[in-house]
Image (tube, helix red, strand yellow):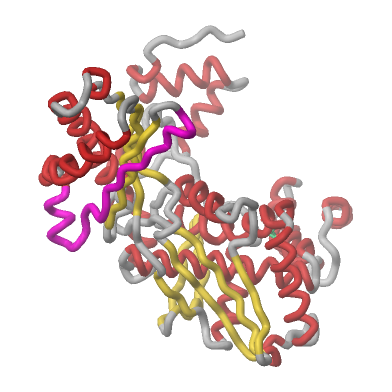
Amino acid sequence: MKTPVEGFSKLSKAEKIDWIAQNCTEDPKTSKQLLERYWNMDPQVQKLHDEFIENTLSNYYLPFAVAPNFLIDGEIYAIPMAIEESSVVAAASKAAKFWLDRGGFKTEILGTEKVGQVHFIYKGDPKKLTRFFETLKPELLQSVSTITQNMEKRGGGINHIELRDLSAKIEGYHQLHCTFETLDAMGANFINSCLEQFAQTLKEKAKLHTDFSEEEKNIEVVMSILSNYVPHCLVKAEVSCLIAQLETKDMPAEEFAQKFLRAVNIAKVEPYRAVTHNKGIMNGIDAVVLATGNDFRAVEAGVHAYAAKEGRYSSLTHAKIEDGVFKFWIEVPLALGTVGGLTTLHPLVKLALEILQKPSAKELMRIVAVAGLAQNFAAVRSLVTTGIQKGHMKMHLLNMLNQMGASENEKKQLVEYFKNHTVTNASVKEALEKIKK
Ligand code: MEV
């Protein structure tokens, strides 16, 4: 067993690389060279990346791509995506093209409310706490005025502070449940700073509150933190067309519409399918969230909680057929930012936002929801027509050939060959061996 390392974070970058290469890899020299090869050639840019997190050794590349031809609310976008999965960008582009000819995507912002909570323990008379809270509320707002003044000038700030009694669940457990408008910022730092100040004010004012007994004065703050569950920071994206317009070479329009609808309805009632269905949606959403420097873990957590809001995990998308019209839509909570965080630091994030014409947070919510809907359309379309493997394996072919050590010329020949043949691991291996011979 390895022994723990002391003071690793205090070592220089070169020392860290040496230590890791020596202690954790089979070929230290090659490992070191590999880590260094992934450094940016501009030392300033590399320094930026080094300082994003602690103990940076190198950079971890993901492909940065665009899916063009997205018609969203009358504007055309090329959507930047950062993702490793072979078929995602191709599928998004295909769905964008499909809907470009059928009226495009329409979106609606249903809310922009963010949430944060101060969790605390108060063991005492609930009526006294309620009375205390009424006098406390203006003091809470006053206590954060220096934090909120800029946000307020721009039209944002604290929307609401509510006292919630959850003592039936955990003895003495209460919350200050707070809602915020953070405009173009994702708002995590703003919200957490406000909450920590609320917590301090709550404790201090309780100590001085003469109506409280000594025990009641002793409020214990457990934690103050934003919530990534944002069911009212919500966006809807939709496509619709006449059923007849769904005709493709793969299937007659009416049959396709019915099969598609059934597939979506299965994801609504069947959690095993819903998880995979939503995973396909997140292929699109995460890729754009990541490319635009947003926190995809926060988005993931909030989206999946939303998918389970009725008490059972279900589809994020919905479909219906009415009077000969096919409608397909998504409703998804997205707390995103287009200012702050990585948005002004990471050069590729800046470029991604520029490619999107420097969107506001609301515009980015619309674009991201569309990417999720498009991805789901492409996946379900393949699933109910050709099956997923045909397109997926075609896109995966280059990865397989790279893994098998194919030369550029062999790759070219085999990509051509597999236009008319089924891609499987065995068939690719066999075809490559044949060429090599
Ligand atoms: C693969 O990354 C995503 C899919 O499984 C989504 C789906 O099944 O809907 C194809």
Residues in magenta, as a range: 148-170
Q: Residue at x 76, y 46 (%)?
A: 404
| Lateral position of residue 286 relative to residue 434, left or right | left
In this rendered view, identify the residue nearer to me: 135 or 394: 135
Q: Residue at x 15, y 43 (%)?
A: 144
In this rendered view, identify the residue nearer to me: 432 or 124: 124
Q: Count numbered badges in the picture.
A: 0
Q: Is residue 74 above or below residue 337?
A: below
Q: Position of residue 369 (x, y in %)?
A: 49, 66
Q: Residue at x 43, y 63 (%)?
A: 234
Q: Quadrant of residue 132?
A: top left
Q: Position of residue 288 (x, y in %)?
A: 47, 59
In this rendered view, identify the residue nearer to me: 262 or 11: 262
Q: Position of residue 201 (x, y in %)?
A: 18, 33
| Lateral position of residue 50 relative to residue 277, left or right | left
| Lateral position of residue 202 relative to residue 87, left or right | left
| Lateral position of residue 155 relative to residue 248, left or right | left
Q: Position of residue 296 (x, y in %)?
A: 47, 49
Judge whether residue 407 can be spotted in this image.
Answer: yes
